[in-house]
Image (cartoon, grey):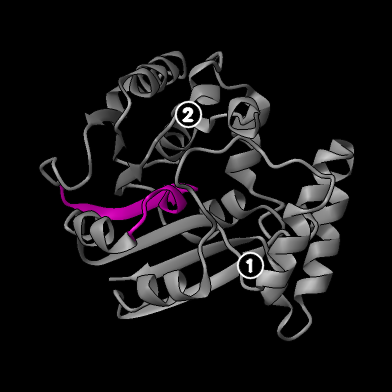
Amino acid sequence: MEAVMKLEATGVQLKEEVTRTSENIWARYRENRNWRIYPKEWVYKNIALEGKDVLDFGCGTGEIATQIAFLGAHRVYALDVNHGLLDLTRRRAELDGLADRVTMVFGKIGEVEPRPVDVIVVNKVLHHCFPLENVMPALLRWLKPGGTFVAIEPVVYLKSLEWLRDHSLIPNGPLDEGERKLRPEDMRYVASLFSESQTHHFRVLGRLSRIWPKGDRLYRQIDRLILSVPMAWRFAGTAVFVGRY
């Protein structure tokens, strides 16, 4: 019964209706006023994208790809293994007038010819890609020397905390088969591939947003206070990892 009722994340994405991005969204990501509390805004605020060639690994419905193009990237390669998602990405880029800077790439990362890029952006995709040892080397074939790798991923550092979350009455979001949050050993492996790296943490109270969505901003502000305490990062649910190659 549980398997029958479980939502499948890719299926949910494929049912999304793609529309033209609103001016409010463009203004938000152009200004990034809330970069301290939102992981994606942190990336757009702190990672140089203008004039760069960028790989959006696991592009999904194309939100990240089109936003990066809007922020001034020279070329965005939107890669996915699902033709339906690439069709949605193509449609989004056309509606937003950015089709000339977004190139669709179909296939598994280890089976497509790499294009040299300055930046690789991964938004909540690595936790679908185990073992990471089969994926990260292929990804890094795309990255120019001195390039930047940035990933926003769900993480779990304390098994006891994750047990409490899983046994709470708050439901999980839609899940794909085989996905799991990145663990400390996963983070150490990814960091070992770069000459230098840093990790920024978010989302201690994130799951409460499923109970009261209107409180999301408040929860995130409280998160920042919690995460300012030494070692409190162990309670985080989301990490932004940045590696210099």
Circle 1 residues within 10 Å: few <14, some 14–19, many ≥20: many
Q: Which residue is denoted by mark 1 in the rendering? A: 201
Residue at figure coordinates x 10%, y 42% from the top left: 113
Query: Where residue 46 sits in the image (x, y, percent)?
Result: 52, 61
Residue that numbered label 2 is attached to: 10
Where does the C terminus fall, quadrant-wise? bottom left
Q: Residue sitting at 54 percent across and 30 percent down? A: 8
Q: Is residue 151 magenta?
A: no
Observer-nearest of 212 and 105: 212
Residue 123 belongs to magenta span: yes
Residue shown at the point (19%, 53%) measured from the top left: 142
Residues 79 and 132: in front is 132
Check if mark 1's residue and mark 2's residue have beta carbons within 8 Å: no
Q: Amino acid at mark 1?
A: His
Magenta residues span 115-131
Whether residue 57 sits left or right of residue 175 in the image: it is left
Residue placed most toward the observer, 9 or 96: 9
